[in-house]
Image (cartoon, rainbow, N blue to C red):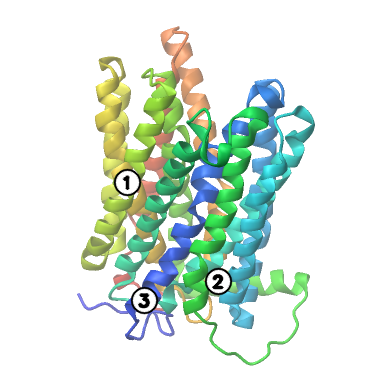
Amino acid sequence: MTEIAPEGSALAVTKQVPRRSVVAWAMWDWGTQPLNTVIITFVFSVYITSAAFGDRNVTSLALAVSTALAGLVVAVIAPVLGQNSDRTGRTVRNLRWQTWVIAALAAALFFVRPDPTFLWLGLGILAVASIVGEIANVNYYALIDEVSTKQNVGRVSGFGWGLGYLGGIVALLALNFGFIAPEVGLFGVSSTDGLDIRASMVVCGMWIAVFTLPTFLTLRDRPKPAPPRVGVAQSYVLLFRSLVDLWRQSPHTVFFLAASALFRDGLSGVFAFGAVIAAGTFGFEPGDVIIFGALANVIAGVSTIAFGVVDDRIGPKKVILFSLTALVALGLGIFFLHDRGQIVFWTLGMAMTAFVGPAQAASRSYLARLIPEGKSGEIFGLYATTGRAISFLAPTFFALAILLGAWVTGEENTQYWGILGIVVVLLAGLLVLIPVREPADIVPGG
């Protein structure tokens, strides 16, 4: 079938994109990945919820509240700020200052000492950093139409996402062996007063600032006439009109936003609760978890880059469906074989990581193929909003499944039932995605 891009699509015209532009764009993912891998997931979030900051239930609840509030802010402002970038044509400029803010906030975590009086300072900086990071992602995603065509957007998206995985794990391992693991690390840094973690945050800030430089030295905003001033209220009016137009012109794009919100939350749950299940159900030691996480990120990075080629050949929807089907099957395998020992998680859990990245990257390339010209920021803002709007599903179903397991079996540790909660969310996204058309089959108004 001949591919028909929507009229006026940002990817409708084949163009020559220098390879250095693609690499420069992807370097932003490599450069900013410590925010997610080191700060939000593996290091600072563990540090801020440790006993040094108070009772673990109190610190964990505080982290949950701050994270939820940050997600709410993103859901409200992401599409409007993306719309502003589209209207002004200042996507690269906005991304640049947002990146510098992320770097500064990461370094500012150095001042969060291991003391209860610093709990909310740390959580506040973390929340603002996550908000700015999500908004920056909207602008970063919007730039994909500048460095790709409809023939190679899958490869470009997969390359960027895969490079991000690899960058995150390189940063994590460098900090672990340079500052965190040794009794006395580089520059004489030790764990006294949390200095190993706090120094790592400074390095994260420097990493972000340095490794994103190629992006801003290479990519440029396209000149646009000065736009009329639009107030906050009017921005939301324009957003509502755009949603109505999007529904009329391409309802399958709206269907996809709904489906992707579901399965992206399930994909987040795979990584969010993977380490928890490894330790609580399969008895992994902390060192084993780090090794597993390192290997998992390498596998995820390589597989995401490889599936990007497949995406361009068979279409993003098929990549997503295959990935989600594999994840559901592997998740069920872990549930039913949980009593067979660690080998189950080393094999099936590691296999799951190979399909998370491809589904995420293909989701981005799917949407990029459908976005009308001049609407990238706004649509990817909606993409961020829909994802945030139901980001409570995976954690909720994870917890409910554990409670159900305790009720059904009467066992004290039914954590492995939480896997079924993640599987349910992934399966829901898969089922909603099935009737959605491939981008190649969508024409304006259809």
CA–CA distance between discs 2 and 1?
30 Å
**Where does the image place residue 259, in percent across and percent down from the top left?**
43, 53
Relative to 240, is 268 on the left or the right? Answer: left
Q: Are marks 1 and 3 in contact (CB under 8 Å)?
A: no
Foreground residue among 152 and 231: 152
Residue annotated with mark 2: 377
Q: Residue at x 57, y 43 (%)?
A: 200
For label 1, the crowd category at 10 Å Cα-Cα, with few meaning under 14, some 14 to 19 and many 20 or more, is many
CA–CA distance between discs 1 and 3?
23 Å
Q: Amino acid at mark 3?
A: Arg
Q: Amino acid at mark 2?
A: Gly
For residue 182, above or below residue 248:
above
Q: Quadrant of the C terminus?
A: bottom left
**Where does the image place residue 410, in percent across and percent down from the top left?**
45, 7
SS for callout 2: helix
Residue farthest along the front direction in this orientation: 188
Residue annotated with mark 3: 20
Residue annotated with mark 1: 298
SS for callout 3: helix
Question: Which badge, 1 or 3, is on the more N-terminal residue?
Answer: 3
Quadrant of the rendered image containing residue 63: top right
